[in-house]
Image (cartoon, grey):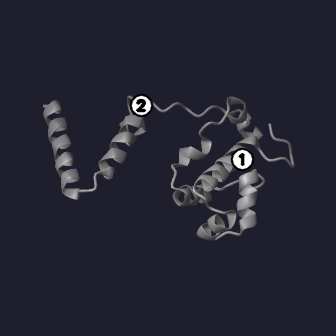
Amino acid sequence: MASKGFPNPIDVHVGSRIRLRRTLLGLSQERLADALGLTFQQVQKYERGANRVSSSRLYDLARTLDVSLPYFFEEMSASVAAQTPSKLLDTKKLPEIDEDRDPMARRETLELVRAYYRIADSSVRKQLYNLVKTVAKAAQD
């Protein structure tokens, strides 16, 4: 658990992923900061884990660095992942989502929607949409 005055290991990990991607893209801290409307000192603090990155800023970083949001948490060791804020340790576990009852909670649904919107031609998307509706209706009959 991170002590008071020390960055949380998860924040340090997220910061290291920001630095890694920035470096791979050949961006300076100054250039990334400009793209985000920040000072380079703020980028430094994010990269060190000294400042926690808000969800909206993480979203901006993902778009600017051309990565998905999960990228920032990839390759996190189990010991780092266990370093959750102390407030969460005392709360009850959130209920599991029943994927059988809620198809919107399925990973397959998300992957299908993402693949659908990667189809650039809107007329092809519409044809696929109509096909799926027809097959689903036939399956119900």
The reply to whether residue 106 is in sight is no
Nearest to the observer: residue 26 or residue 125: 26
Q: Which of the 4 quarters of the picture holds residue 13?
A: top right
The amino acid marked with disc number 2 is Glu
Q: Which residue is drawn at the image coordinates 12% and 31% (left, top)?
A: 141
Above or below 65: residue 37: below
Asked if the residue under mark 2 is in contact with the one under mark 1, i.e. CB atoms within 8 Å, the reply is no
Nearest to the observer: residue 102 or residue 12: 12
The amino acid marked with disc number 1 is Asp
- Disc ID at residue 99: 2
Residue with the mark numbered 1: 11
Query: Pointer 2: residues within 10 angstroms few (<14), some, or many (20+)?
Result: few
**Dot 1: element:** helix
Q: Which residue is drawn at the image coordinates 38% and 28% (left, top)?
A: 100
Label located before the other in sequence (1 or 2):
1
Residue 62: x percent and y percent?
A: 55, 55
Residue 28: x percent and y percent?
A: 66, 63
Nearest to the observer: residue 116 or residue 16: 16
Q: Quadrant of the N terminus?
A: top right
